[in-house]
Image (cartoon, grey):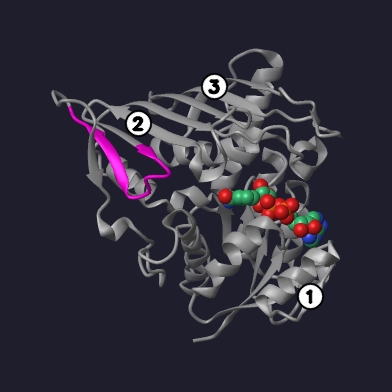
Amino acid sequence: MKTIGVAIVGCGGITLQNHVPGLALCPDTKVVALCDTDKACLQKASQQTGVKTISTDYKETVSRDDVDAVIIATPNVTHALIAHAAIAAGKHVLCEKPIAMNFREALGMYEAAERAKVRHMSAFTYRFVPAMRYLAHLVKSGALGEPYHYRSCRLQDWGNRPLGWRQVSKLAGTGELGDMLSHRIDFAHSLMGPMRRLVANTKRFIDDRQGTPSDLEDWAAILAEFQNGATGVLESSKVATGRNESWRSQDYVEVNGSQASYVFFTERWNELQVGKPGGLGLEKTIIPEEFWGVPGSPRDPRKGDPLVTFRYDQNFEFIDAIRNERPCVPSFLDGARAQAVMDSAIQSANEKRWVDPPKVG
Ligand SMILES: NC(=O)c1ccc[n+]([C@@H]2O[C@H](COP(=O)([O-])OP(=O)(O)OC[C@H]3O[C@@H](n4cnc5c(N)ncnc54)[C@H](O)[C@@H]3O)[C@@H](O)[C@H]2O)c1
């Protein structure tokens, strides 16, 4: 089997936490080049991975002959430029979320990748949480009955610490909306389909993060109606004091339909709460083992911290799609769909009115 050569552009937090260990588990896959504009970061990643081919110029990296696929894990403002360069060089691309600064840019990436016939994937990592994979299976199999409600709530306490590029609109595009809520917008799409209309609000509580100005929201909420008639309520905050961070904090999704309700919390990765008509209320159900990982993934779900290791299946999905010449899930089109909703949410908040997100795909 031919080894798939991968280049990683952007060697910061998410690369070292997710992509490097995720790729290490993929059979016949090798990280062959690293790129970062920050030399210290590049050196650290090179030492940690043993990858000696390094560059501060993404154009040089993505055009290398030994590179088949590119992972883009840089600040949002650079995603489209790097993706277009990689696609033009005929490389498959996995891009971090949000994949672009706006819907138009995201759609351009999708169209370019399709034209070039390369694989394209959006890093909506939480699709790989076992409980979410099982929930998606249940909803698709009709277990919910008529869908009534989708509800998600992500509450973290990031305090007033500096967030680097994440707090600057010209680098990140949006704040909490793209950073955290984009994951839940994508999951809502995967369960309920597209949104017909929405009304949204955003708010920034902290203008100054320890001496560095922030011009982006640290709270966002969307009230939605899906094309299938279901309603949606999505909320996400970075300033829910005392809630802690990451997966130690509140991350909740609930769906209600005519036949059942399902609830999960990310920290209980292999558990769903289920409610049925006439029942006593929500009861715990354990996720069947077949949903603990993506089919074919070499990852042992019993090894390591399950709240970290499910993320490695995202890399397997990318590599497996390349190997088997099939579309990645989620794709750039899913990234563009989420971006369309984000753009509409910003428009709704600015204009204080309901907005119909553009139909995508
Ligand atoms: N899928 C997820 O769950 C998840 C989690 C965290 C971050 N992310 C996304 O990943 C991306 C990176 O986030 P992070 O937390 O790793 O950020 P980070 O700041 O830790 O790392 C980004 C790196 O990109 C480098 N960089 C900036 N411009 C560059 C360029 N033009 N070429 C090469 N390198 C460049 C920076 O020097 C930095 O080392 C963002 O889009 C973010 O939204 C996704």
| Label annotation for residue 54 | 1
Marks 1 and 2: CB-CB under 8 Å? no
Which of the 4 image quarters holds residue 245? top right
**Alpha carbon separation for disc pair 1 and 2:** 46 Å
Secondary structure type for disc 1 = strand
**Residue 72: quadrant of the picture:** bottom right
Q: Which residue is mark 3?
A: 198
Q: Quadrant of ligand 1?
A: bottom right
In the rendered image, which residue does mark 2 sit on? 255
The disc labelled 3 sits on which kind of residue? Leu
Dot 1 beta carbon under 8 Å from ligand 1: no
Nearer the N terminus, badge 3 or badge 1? Answer: 1
Residue 315 point in image, percent of width and height: 53, 64
In the rendered image, residue 154, in percent from the top left (x then y), is placed at 52, 33
Discs 3, 1 touching: Cβ within 8 Å: no
Q: Is residue 265 magenta?
A: yes
Per the rendered image, the range of residues in magenta is 264-276
- Decide which of 347, 221 is in the foreground and name it: 221
Density class for disc 3 (Cα within 10 Å; few <14, some 14-19, many ≥20) is many
